[in-house]
Amino acid sequence: MNQKNIKKLSFLAPIGLALYWLILLKASAMPESKEGFILQSGYIKYLLGWIGISLLVVGLAYIHYKWVFLKIVYHHNPAVQALWFPWVSMLLWLIFEVLQFRTGHFEGYIDENILISLLGLVLILMVAYLCDYIRTKQLQTQLLQSKSEADLHALKAQINPHFLFNVLNTVYNQASLEESPNTADMILKISDLLRFAIEEAPKSKIPLDKEISFLQNYIDLQKARLPQSPMIELDFQWEISPNKFVVSPMLLMPLAENAFRYGLSLSHPCYIRLSAILEQQTLKFSIENSNFAVGREGLGTGLKQVQERLKLEYNNQNEFHIQKSDKIFSVQLKLNLGN
């Protein structure tokens, strides 16, 4: 079943509920002669009924936001998003049936119960959107605070970029004249990394090709630092065809940095396996490495920042999974670049 059919079927739930109410309203047009519910049951029971309904709505609002709203509304799969209408219809039906039970299924209360059910649903939805707005603002504040701290740290260690570029160009030219192509290539990559950090990193979005090129330069420099050893296995696969997509700058960098920092050893067999694949509008990025992080501080800080950026900048339109054991650490990221 394709996504279009799933979306069409999702509308059957609210339509079915509306038809059910129409049948009940038609039956209640000529109700049997009964005494009013309040006079029959007493005001105390009536009041307790309303307290129960209020508690039900509050409980449903909490369940709706924590367990459903964040899972469905922000899910990257349209088939999951299509569950929104059946879920809302079920909430509406549940409130209505509780009200019907409270009023003894007396037909004279059907129109009133429908109205109250709709108002209860509106309240539940308002609570969810309000909580989500507060959550987003808190994430933005945390991200801005982290960025300010990072900017301050970079400012303290800042070197005049023009001077640094000029020095690197001089060394690069000297290495070329002395016929040291490997040295010249490394200097050029360092220059590209610095230029990227100064010119591209402050932007909100950059072309995906630039982000991948930056990551490749970083990996090449890391590989150049490592000795030639049969105990070290490095496998990097790139399947990024020319495209028009953009991505947040330096989003992938902490994932690779974490692998090189905690995944390599000069005295034990170790490996890093990285894969970056672009399929239609989805970037599939995975990296797996041996784990030598036991007892070492700092692991996870960069990964937490990546998770926070994904929540804030991509509205959870992604899949981010971390798997770790005593010997293996892996990260898988699926990022929808089409929105």
Image (cartoon, rainbow, N blue to C red):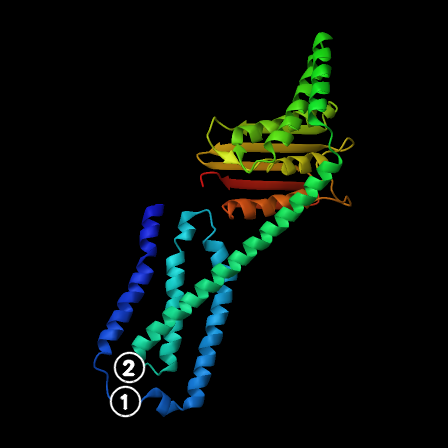
Point out the tag, 2 or 1, that comes first from the N-terminus. Answer: 1
Q: Are the residues at dot 2 and dot 1 in contact (C-beta closer than 8 Å)?
A: yes
Numbered marks: total: 2
Residue 249: x and y in percent read 58, 35
Q: Position of residue 224 (x, y in %)?
A: 71, 23
Above/below status of 36 relative to 286: below
For disc 1, the neighbor class at 10 Å (few under 14, some 14 to 19, many from 20) is few
Q: Is residue 168 above or below residue 291?
A: above
| Residue at the spot of label 2 | 108
Element type at marker 1?
A: loop
Question: Residue 266, located in which quarter of the rendered image?
Answer: top right
> Is residue 278 rendered to the left or right of residue 150?
left
Is residue 27 shown left or right of residue 87? Answer: left
Q: Which mark is residue 63?
A: none
- Determine the image quadrant of residue 291: top right
Regarding residue 233, the answer to whether it shows in the image is: yes
Q: Residue at x 46, y 71 (%)?
A: 57
Which residue is drawn at the image coordinates 70% and 19% (left, top)?
166
Residue flagged by tag 2: what amino acid is it? Gly
Amino acid beneath label 1: Lys
Residue 94 visible in the displayed image: no
Front-most of residues 138 and 280: 138
